Image (tube, rainbow, N blue to C red):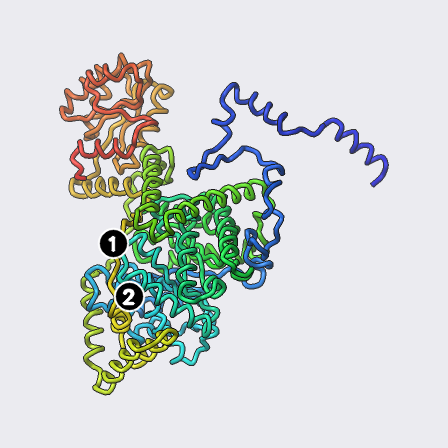
């Protein structure tokens, strides 16, 4: 660089002296014109964390993990030093089809088009170890596949190379009976068990959290967990057998700290139970995976995944685990809590940001939910869009080429530390209560989630929390997507007949072999149970027969309080569906007439607000031309056929407008429901006396108000 350029740069820099935080804050407060800095520029998260408007190096100066490297303890920056450079994350997809053949068609189609991981969701009957003819009505084929025999599993995985495609199986509280089917199938096909990859999930606490009970005791679940874990450690080292799901805590309405604290406590419980049964920390931890659900809060979700790895490393280290055992493997799933049945294509945008945060946060595998998954069995189109979301992040955005892209951000590092600190504190609280199972029996986690869900539900009802297309920016004339034409009763009857025929068609020799195989399960000692189950399956035993034999001496524990899985939009959706249903019977949806009084500048703001307010409830909003007097507005209201009339003007004009307008409307429409747009506090009683029935405004509980008004015009709850 020449001396002239250096001199020029020095003169330029001298005109812009460095500014410190104090100077910046002073200017920021000055620009607020007397408003509170903390109220206007500091954001309070539901986790109780305050987000600053500006982060500096000083905010991460004391964080040791911020100076760590990817692939090294505490693994906050990723479980592998190379990030996704070598293999990328596993691109998987849940397939919830009830029929094995239907599942197989979808799986083969999707594997040929980019999937390298299949999420096999089993129906409740299969997860509970019940054959279709023994299961309760409603448990067979509902949001999952029915599997009872080795032939069923062969049909489901026909053409799928088990050595090349990772298999994630939502097998519920115990995976041992299903694992016997899988091992038998792999051996029948001549596949190497050592090459099996994925996770045959066992998560009894996770199941109990959202179902309130298990089909067996916790002790039996842990005995079966130990058997499968010990077998996998020796025979299938690439196969994980324990999965800690965060689904109940997220889908029940909890926040990031709940997810961290409760999943960590669950993982600790599993580690201890396996150690009591003779396993080492390293054996257990290396066969575990966390399945964490992510939502739309982009930066919070990134920090949550990073904090989860750090907390797990800390826990395993405390229990004496090696550095390798401290590496947490995370499966990310986009959430359903914020997904909607109205304006469903918006769900594509939601899952895109969620998938982005999952990759940036360092997931090892991921499932992106199809946009219509909360409505019906997803078709090829919706599965393709979901799959391509990940493929675009991988192939076009090339996120596989960046290692911990969030690392070094003062904001992200600080948020990671805050979430980790609060997550660890919640974990310690659970430990003080005796561990996760004891805390759940007492209802502590469930109460925490219920309180968080109630708080969020109020915000959504009052529209301080926006759900696009549902409680704000609704597409008025929209009809919901058609659901799936699935007849559960008919499906159960058909599957029951298939299994009954399977049993009765067996010859005496096979029946004898089945009975001998089941007897070996009863007689098997520790370390022999899975192989005995595999022998019984290969002889022809069904999953239900194996499960009954395994648990012949077992009795389920007492039920416990459960977390209610929900979606935040459900209240508005129920109302809107009721309004739409009423409209189909009545020949049209309930109409709302906007009595917009005076010139545009006088009524437009409240007319726009009123239109949006009623459209989220499914009402048909008409009017809004601007009326010079009460008679003109009343005549237009009567002609519109509306049962609800909304007066739209200003607080200053209402005292003169309202009495005459209400009288004019009621003279033409005696049963009209009169609503005022706004809430002028000093005028409320006068307006009520004049005949105004209700008020809509920004502070109103929109869901409650709309429900009340819908009932006034004949919509059944």
- Picture quarter with the C terminus: top left
Task: Tally the numbered discs.
Answer: 2
| Local crowd size for mark 2, using a 10 Å CA cut-off: few (<14), some (14–19), many (≥20) | many
- Relative side of 204 to 500, left or right: right
Q: Quadrant of the N terminus?
A: top right
Q: Are marks 2 and 1 in contact (CB under 8 Å)?
A: no
Q: Position of residue 23 (x, y in %)?
A: 63, 25
Which residue: 33% across, 72% down?
153
Q: Residue at x 32, y 56 (%)?
A: 207
Q: Which mark is residue 126?
A: 2
Label 2 and label 1: CA atoms lie apart by: 20 Å
Q: At which x and y percent is residue 118?
A: 41, 64
Mark 1 residue crowding within 10 angstroms, few (<14) / some (14–19) / many (20+): few
**Residue at x 24%, y 70% (from the top left corner):** 552
Residue drawn at 36 percent across, 37 percent down: 473
Q: Position of residue 74 (x, y in %)?
A: 56, 53
Residue of label 1: 559
């Amino acid at each position: 660089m020449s001396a002239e350029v250096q001199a020029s740069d020095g003169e330029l820099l001298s005109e812009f002296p460095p500014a410190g935080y104090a100077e910046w804050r002073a200017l920021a407060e000055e620009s607020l014109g007397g408003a509170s800095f903390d109220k206007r520029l500091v954001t309070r998260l539901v986790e109780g964390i305050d987000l600053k408007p500006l982060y500096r190096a000083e905010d991460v100066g004391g964080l040791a993990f911020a100076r760590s490297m990817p692939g090294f303890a505490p693994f906050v920056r990723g479980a592998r030093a190379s990030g996704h450079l070598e293999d990328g994350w596993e691109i998987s997809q849940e397939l919830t089809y009830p029929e094995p053949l239907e599942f197989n068609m979808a799986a083969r189609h999707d594997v040929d088009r980019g999937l390298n991981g299949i999420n096999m969701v089993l129906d409740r009957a299969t997860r509970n170890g019940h054959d279709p003819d023994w299961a309760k009505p409603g448990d067979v084929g509902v949001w999952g596949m029915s599997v009872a025999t080795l032939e069923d599993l062969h049909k489901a995985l026909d053409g799928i190379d088990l050595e090349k495609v990772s298999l994630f199986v939502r097998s519920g509280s115990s995976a041992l009976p299903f694992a016997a089917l899988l091992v038998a199938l792999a051996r029948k096909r001549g596949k190497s068990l050592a090459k099996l990859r994925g996770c045959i999930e066992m998560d009894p606490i996770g199941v109990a959290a959202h179902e309130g009970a298990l089909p067996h005791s916790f002790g039996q679940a842990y005995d079966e967990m130990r058997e499968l874990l010990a077998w996998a450690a020796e025979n299938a080292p690439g196969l994980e057998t324990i999965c800690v799901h965060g689904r109940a805590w997220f889908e029940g309405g909890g926040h990031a700290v709940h997810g961290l604290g409760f999943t960590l406590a669950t993982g600790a419980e599993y580690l201890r139970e396996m150690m009591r049964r003779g396993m080492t920390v390293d054996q257990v931890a290396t066969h575990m995976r966390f399945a964490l659900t992510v939502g739309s809060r982009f930066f919070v979700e990134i920090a949550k995944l990073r904090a989860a790895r750090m907390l797990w490393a800390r826990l395993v280290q405390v229990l004496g685990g090696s550095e390798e055992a401290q590496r947490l493997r995370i499966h990310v799933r986009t959430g359903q809590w914020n997904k909607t049945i109205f304006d469903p294509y918006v769900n594509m945008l939601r899952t895109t940001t969620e998938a982005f945060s999952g990759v940036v946060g360092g997931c090892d595998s991921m499932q992106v939910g199809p946009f219509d998954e909360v409505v019906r069995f997803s078709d090829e189109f919706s599965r393709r869009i979901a799959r391509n979301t990940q493929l675009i992040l991988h192939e076009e955005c090339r996120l596989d080429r960046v290692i911990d892209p969030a690392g070094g951000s003062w904001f992200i590092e600080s948020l990671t530390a805050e979430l980790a600190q609060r997550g660890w504190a919640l974990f310690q609280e659970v430990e003080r209560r005796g561990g996760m199972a004891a805390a759940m029996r007492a209802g502590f986690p469930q109460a925490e989630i219920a309180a968080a869900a109630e708080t969020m539900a109020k915000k959504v009802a009052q529209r301080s929390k926006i759900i696009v297309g549902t409680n704000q920016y609704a597409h008025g004339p929209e009809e919901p997507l058609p659901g799936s034409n699935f007849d559960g009763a008919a499906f159960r009857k058909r599957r029951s007949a298939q299994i009954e025929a399977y049993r009765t068609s067996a010859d005496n020799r096979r029946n004898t072999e089945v009975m001998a195989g089941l007897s070996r399960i009863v007689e098997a000692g520790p370390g022999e149970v899975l192989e005995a189950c595999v022998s019984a399956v290969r002889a022809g035993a069904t999953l239900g027969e194996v499960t009954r034999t395994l648990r012949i001496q077992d009795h389920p524990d007492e039920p416990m309080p459960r977390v209610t899985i929900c979606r935040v939009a459900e209240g508005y959706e129920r109302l809107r569906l009721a309004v739409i249903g009423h409209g189909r019977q009545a020949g049209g949806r309930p109409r709302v007439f906007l009595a917009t009084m005076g010139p545009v500048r006088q009524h437009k703001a409240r007319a726009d607000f009123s239109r949006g307010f009623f459209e989220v409830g499914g009402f048909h909003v008409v009017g809004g031309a601007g009326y010079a007097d009460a008679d003109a507005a009343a005549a237009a209201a009567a002609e519109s056929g509306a049962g609800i009339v909304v007066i739209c003007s200003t607080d200053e004009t209402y005292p003169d407008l309202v009495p005459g307008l209400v009288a004019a409307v009621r003279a033409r429409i005696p049963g009209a429901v009169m609503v005022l747009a706004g809430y002028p506090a000093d005028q409320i009683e006068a307006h009520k006396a004049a005949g105004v029935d209700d008020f809509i405004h920004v502070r109103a509980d929109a869901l409650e108000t709309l429900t009340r008004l819908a009932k006034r015009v004949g919509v059944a709850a």
